[in-house]
């Protein structure tokens, strides 16, 4: 199973997953390049809340 947290960490080049919220714009740009259907819905919800502080439904509609 794919892990969006570690995939995004590698794509952004962060040392730690905890750095991702400091790179929201880069994360958002990378998310547009990913096939989000490859990730479990629960993980996408957790990721959106952790990085952006909003529910996944809010960013999925954007």
Image (tube, helix red, strand yellow):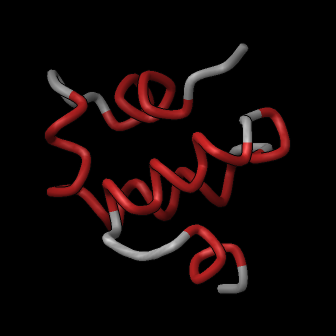
Q: Is residue 19 left or right of residue 58?
A: left
The C terminus lies in which quarter of the figure?
A: bottom right
Give the x, y percent position of residue 51: 32, 57
- Pick the front one: 39 or 31: 39
Q: Is residue 30 above or below residue 17?
A: below
Give the x, y percent position of residue 48: 46, 60
Q: Is residue 7 above or below residue 53?
A: above
Residue reaching furthest right?
37
State which quadrant residue 24 falls in.
bottom left
The N terminus lies in which quarter of the figure?
A: top right
| Number of numbered tags placed on the structure image | 0
Q: Is residue 16 above or below residue 24?
A: above
Q: Is residue 18 left or right of residue 5?
A: left
Which residue sits at x=50%, y=25%? 7
Q: Is residue 52 left or right of residue 43?
A: left
Which residue sits at x=15%, y=41%? 19
Q: Is residue 41 above or below residue 57?
A: above
Residue reaching furthest top?
1
Which residue sits at x=15%, y=57%? 22
Which residue sits at x=39%, y=23%? 10
Give the x, y percent position of residue 36: 75, 47
């Amino acid at each position: 199973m794919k892990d969006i947290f570690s995939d995004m960490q590698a794509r952004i080049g962060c040392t730690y997953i905890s750095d991702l919220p400091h790179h929201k714009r880069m994360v958002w740009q990378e998310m547009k390049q990913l096939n989000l259907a490859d990730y479990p819905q629960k993980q996408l919800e957790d990721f959106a809340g952790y990085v952006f502080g909003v529910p996944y439904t809010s960013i999925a509609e954007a």
